[in-house]
Image (spheres, coloured by chain):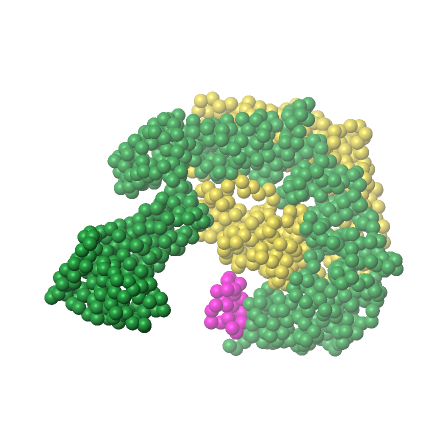
Chain colours: A green, B yellow
Amino acid sequence: MGPLSREAWAQRLGAFRMSPSTFMAGAESEDLGRDLLSDLRNEKLSEPTKVSLLALSLEYPDKLWPDALAAEAAATFLLDTLLLLPPRPSALRRPLLLAATTTLLVGGALSPTSGASCRLLPLLLGLALGRDVGRGFGPTSEQRLLQATACECLRELESCKPGLLRGSLGLLRSLSGQAGPIQPLSMLLALVLRNTLVVQSRSGAGLQDLLVAGVFSPGGGSWDWTLAEEADDQLLPQTPSWPAAEKEPGLAGLEPSPEEARELRAAVAQLLDTSYLLTTVAQAQLLWLLGWALRGLRGQSPVIFKPQLARLLGTAQVTLLHSVLALKAAFGEALFTAQDEALLLRRLTLAAQHPALPSPTHLFYLHCLLSFPENSPLGLEGEEAAPLLLGHQLCRSLMPDLLNDPMAFLARLHLLCLLCAEDEEQEKGQVPSPRQYLLELLAGLRQRAALDGSPQDLATLCFQASYLVASCLAMQPSVVKPLIHGLSQLYRARPLLAPRFVDLLDRVGPELGRPLKEVLWQEVVTRPGKGEALCCHLQILEKVAEGGAHRATLNFLQAAAIHCTDWGRQQALLRVCQALLRTGGGDGLADLLQGLARQLEDPDGRDHARLYYSLLVHLAGPKLRVALGPSLATPALASSLVAENQGFVATLMVQETPPPIRLSVEPHRAKGPLPMLQLQVEVLDPAYSLELRFCVQGQLYAPLKAIHIPCLCPGRPAHPLYLPLQPRRPAPAQLHVQALYTTPTGLTCHAHLPPLTVNFANLFLPFPQIPKGSERDFFERLWDSCLPKGVESCVWCPLGPQGLEALVSHHLEPFVVVAQPPTSYHIAICLPPDSMLLLRLEAAQVDGVPVVLRTNDWDLLPLAGDYIRGLAAC
Amino acid sequence: MAQRAVWLVRHEPGTPVCGTVRFSRRFPTVEKRAKVFNGASYVPIPEDGPFLKALLFELRLLDNDKVFVESRDSCSRINKTSVYGLSVGGEELWPVVAFLKNGMIYACVPLVEQTLSPRPALISISGISQGLEFLFGMQDFLYSSQKNDTELNTKLSQLPDLLLQACPFGTLLDANLQNSLDNIGFASVTQPQKQPAWKAGTYKGKPQISISITEKCDLEGIMPNVTISLNLPTNGSPLQDILVHPCVTSLDSAILTSSSLDTMDDSAFSGPYKFPFTPPLESFSLCYYTSQVPVPPILGFYQMKEEEVQLKILVNLKLHESVKNNFEFCEAHIPFFNRGPITHLECKVSFGQLEVFREKSLLVWIIGQKFPKSMEISLSGTVTFGVKGHNKQPFDQICIGSTAYVKLHFRILDYTLTGCYADQHSVQVFASGKPKISTNRKLISSDYYIWNSKAPAPVTYISLLP
């Protein structure tokens, strides 16, 4: 793309600023950084346009040059551009310096190996020290501004890479006493000094000669990359937050020699003495920085700050007073005696309500009062409290009144609550009593909130104030009682506030919550309404109705049902019923639900009523609560409708889970009319009301009956389970097993278990009622009956080392009809429904026995063959 | 002590988004530090669009903000400062310092140099006060001597360049943006050593000192005021709650401690109040004070009673004899809130004229430059109202039922209620050349309310004290 005109750039920059991410996703994005740089040298563009291009690179270097390589290239280009500027005044030099610094820092390209860094740093330091940095670097008139800018760039570099300028500390110090812009140099010196102290104390090194002027080497030898090279977590908070900072070891590791301590004191004193020449925001930064830097440093007394304090206390300038509070927090009694503390509190109180200050400042000072860093704090750390020295006298001017804006009102109300909570006895002598005043205020708020058509803000304020008072003074009946009474009056006047009442009930403790529920319930059931009021009543009732359903509640609902003509209201009505179910149902509830199931117009409403009715009559109390209660897994969704539905779904729907048990088929001594599968249970998770369902593939067997087990717990021995099989054909099969059970949390779960295999042998049954004494005849009759319909075959049964006798007794014992141990066995197996398998095992040899078999069922032949051949291996 | 980003948002109710971002500036080097310091609790600065939406929602400035939203309006979500948490993309951006003034929302996000969970107390975050100062500075710049939208737009267009000077890297160097503007102009001046950073250059004109004392008057016991090196007459009311400009170099401890919070006695310090200072170039407020004068300048009562369909009103005003009876203007405003338009009025004033604003339900009694010889004037009559129009008549959350007030607006030149004055001869100037010294004084009404004595009025605790 060729050079752009001013207008084209304005349009492009506008599009970028509108949404950088959208712009960068577009087609033009890749060229933006490149075009921007090249147009900086475009002579057709005016300086202001170029400045606005640089301003963009100051704000979004990460978008323009996203990696270190690109950032390095961009910074190099910016520095080249700087050198190419003609030696006349130019508005571009400052932004070019700022842009090069920002680009290197944000791109992560600042390092001793980066060419741009090695050019920028000496240039900045040279400019900051007021030295001649080379040919044509701007006219002298611009030097002062460039010097200040270079200081700011160095300060930012030192902020992001603490310790970088450690080697230049002495140089900077020697310079700050001489000519040069006072603020940039002071601020830079203060930061480098502070960082040096921390870095040296961490490494356990002394200050050495760092405070004394070094020699400026333009080659860049004075950069300390050791820390800058380390990970980012070496960043040092310039103005650490207490109390976290109080727990830090501070500078205990630093043990300056007496000379070093003297030098340090002189350096700090020099900075403080000229601090009045700085802008107020810079003064505040300086105090904050030096205060926390010297905290806990041996040989440095905080008294050095004292001359500044009286001057600072006279102003209520927010950054200055804040920095005094920071000094207070850093040094406590060492800098502020009890009298000083009292004076500071006085000034703070005064500033917190001074008509000459803006409201955000008032609010901030009120916050500072309640979080005041006291010399000897009594309360818990991090908890807001009224400082001890802030007596009733001072507090009086900070009492809330209805003319305050909402935030100021709440802040002042909090203070008033703290006063009322502090000591109930103390206030007896006071006229009027703060508590009485508090109650009047709350009444005023409620009156405003009750006003028809009053804005939401008033209602919000009223409920926030009520909550605040309830949480501070819940233990004082003289406050809680009128509060509850007032709130019930408010509800009567404006039922539309129902959502706020529900919210309040959700948040407050039982001291207020329980009696408030009671009065609201009274309010609702004694004043049935129609239309919007009815919706509100139902909303409240859902929250406050308790189980054991009062007759009055049920009567109310019964009456309300007539007015619930649309879906929304019916749902609201049903939600109350649901709440009643959850809290214990009650006698008349079933009747009500049954009535609703017939009476409601909306089919969805009728369905719900029917469902609740079924739940009520079928489930016991605890299970009912679980079924209706919110699920533990309810995701945090904005809509309560969805959330409730989720909970409902979770509890009433069957959950798919991994199986709670493991089943295995056990060998089993067959008897009875049907084959029986013996199952061993291994319990993995507790399961209640377990139902095991079996299903056989194909229609080999008749449908299997489910097995019910009331309770299974891991670690407790489980009885074996017996599953009767009703084969339609005598064939092995796979059983699919499903478990349906309840977890201890009440969820109903479903699990698929691994399939069970029914082997051929599992279907064997002995012939019943073999006449004693005539076994041989019996067997022969059977043998003969197989033919001609059936089949005879001969199979070689390999024998293991134990021999035939062991094999028979192990596998075929129940079926032996005639035995002549150890050589001959006649075996008859019954295979329901109507097959049989007859075996003659005779004339065993060493490694096997020939088995002659007959069956009346041709289909059995391959199965029997496989079975016999596999016996020895079993 | 730095800012991660700053915004100016114009609140535009009635438009689809209800506002536009008029200016924004991000500070990427600070953002990089925030990422490290905040660690897992780091939430990035959103783009302007999402920020605007979240800000307007949190400040309840969207047009459809009439419903209760639990996440914002819950009774337990109590915000007592101008610092907010904005929900952006499922995360909470905190701390956002923001306030609305003259239809413009000023907002910034200070850097917190530690993890944000648990949240540190605001008092321990240096960027909070800096952020406030930054925003006040922008507000002063935009609204000082600015009269219309064109001027506002001009000033807004100057902001990017100004911030390059005043806040190049997110650490504020000077909250007085006008200084930065002047700085550009003063670039070619060779400056002497020890030039204060808050003084953009050297003054080239004729030396002069101009002192103006403005006393503001309200009837609730606290009175805002402005002054310089000051004296009181023998019976003057002591000056209290004195706040001085940061350029004041030292303060007498009596000035520092004189406070309206103490019970008054004769031993109270009554001046002279000396303020040694180095003045900045621009005109500035050297100090603010309050005072408790024994009697209000205009005494009066207001009686309003509802009688069936009409209101019966009676206002009586009396100028205190010690007060200079020479006003620049004096008016009594009698508003009627939460009612319909005025349909019928029968009123009689003993002095001055009455103006009726029917649609606004407001009576303005123009008293003029002087009270009559008797010093006492009255207004009486009846007012009838029509049906309340939708949002046409003024709503007020305090003036419910018969709770009502008369508000006085007046200004008296060359007069102060405390008697406070600046003696031209007592001004000491240590500089070459004799400056021209001029002084003037004036008294301006501020919140001067007279409440209806026939109905409950909003009380303040102090006024309840015996």
Q: Which residues are magenta?
A: A7-32
Can residue A123 be seen here? The reply is yes
Q: Position of residue A61 (x, y in %)?
A: 59, 67
Question: Is residue B85 toward the left or the right of residue A562 in the image?
Answer: right
Q: Relative to B88, say whether A143 is above or below.
A: below
Q: Residue at x 68, y 23 (%)?
A: A429
Is residue A555 left or right of B42 when viewed as pictured? Answer: left
Q: Is residue A269 left or right of residue A99?
A: right
Image location of residue A311, percent across then percent down: 79, 46
| Residue B290 visible somewhere in the drawing | no
- Looking at the rendered image, the quarter that the C terminus of chain A falls into is bottom left
Q: Which residue lies most toward the right here?
A: A259
Residue A279 location, x and y as percent? 73, 54
Q: Is residue B243 above or below residue A228?
A: above
The residue shown at (50%, 62%) is: A19
**Which residue occupies 55% across, 28% down?**
A480
- Relative depth, front residue between B62 and B101: B62
Name the image quarter holding residue B412.
top right
Pinpoint residue A271: horizontal percent, then vertical percent. Answer: 80, 56
* Of the pair A213 and A228, the residue shown nearer to us: A228
Which residue is depicted at the point 35% across and 66% down?
A802
**Whether residue B364 is situated above or below residue B201 in the rendered picture:** above
* In the image, residue A324 above or below residue A528: below
Residue B354: quadrant of the picture = top right
Q: Is residue B425 left or right of residue A485?
A: right
Secondary structure mostly seen in the magenta stretch: helix
